[in-house]
Amino acid sequence: MAAGQLAVWAALDDAGRTVGTVGLAFPHPGKPNSPHRAEPVKLMVRRDARGQGIGRGLLADAEEAAAAAGITLLHLDTETDSPAEHLYRSAGWTRAGVIPDHALDPTGVLRPTTLYYKHVHAAAG
């Protein structure tokens, strides 16, 4: 965060408790082929707060910040068949494919991961 390569947002409930978070990983300055792309990371919403638009709002915040920073392409991965896939598709993200056995679930079982991307419009400046 201090180096400007990660921005983080948190959603709070009325009591001031964190109910959701998302990060946006900006391109590493040493990678000259990627200054146009970034990755939303760790979009998480507490189970008891889901279905209220919190994830959608956090995702929109990350997309808007990316565009304001001149980013034109976002990419992410999520567990295949997870509820997050519906969120990404309904928010205009495009499914790019699946990588089998990409990540361990909380019980240690290998699960496939689905890749998504979305073009955003860089803010005029």
Image (cartoon, rainbow, N blue to C red):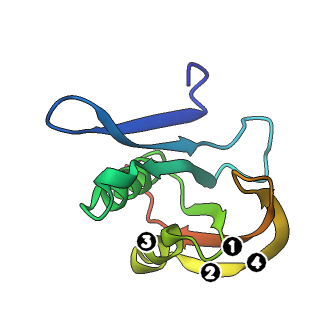
Q: Quadrant of residue 20?
A: top left
Mark 3 vs 4, N-terminal side:
3
Query: Badge 4 is on which residue?
Result: 98
> Disc 1, disc 3: CB below 8 Å?
no
Mark 1 vs 3, N-terminal side:
3
Q: What percent of the width, then of the height, locates residue 74?
A: 57, 61
Q: Residue at x 63, y 64 (%)?
A: 78
**Residue type indicated by callout 4:** Val
Query: Element type at marker 1?
Result: strand
Q: Residue at x 67, y 49 (%)?
A: 35
Dot label at residue 114:
1
Q: What percent of the width, then of the height, locates residue 80?
A: 66, 74
**Residue type indicated by callout 2:** Arg
> Disc 4, disc 1: CB below 8 Å?
yes
Q: Residue at x 77, y 67 (%)?
A: 111
Dot label at residue 87:
3
Label 2 vs label 3, nearer the camera: 3
Q: Quadrant of residue 75?
A: bottom right
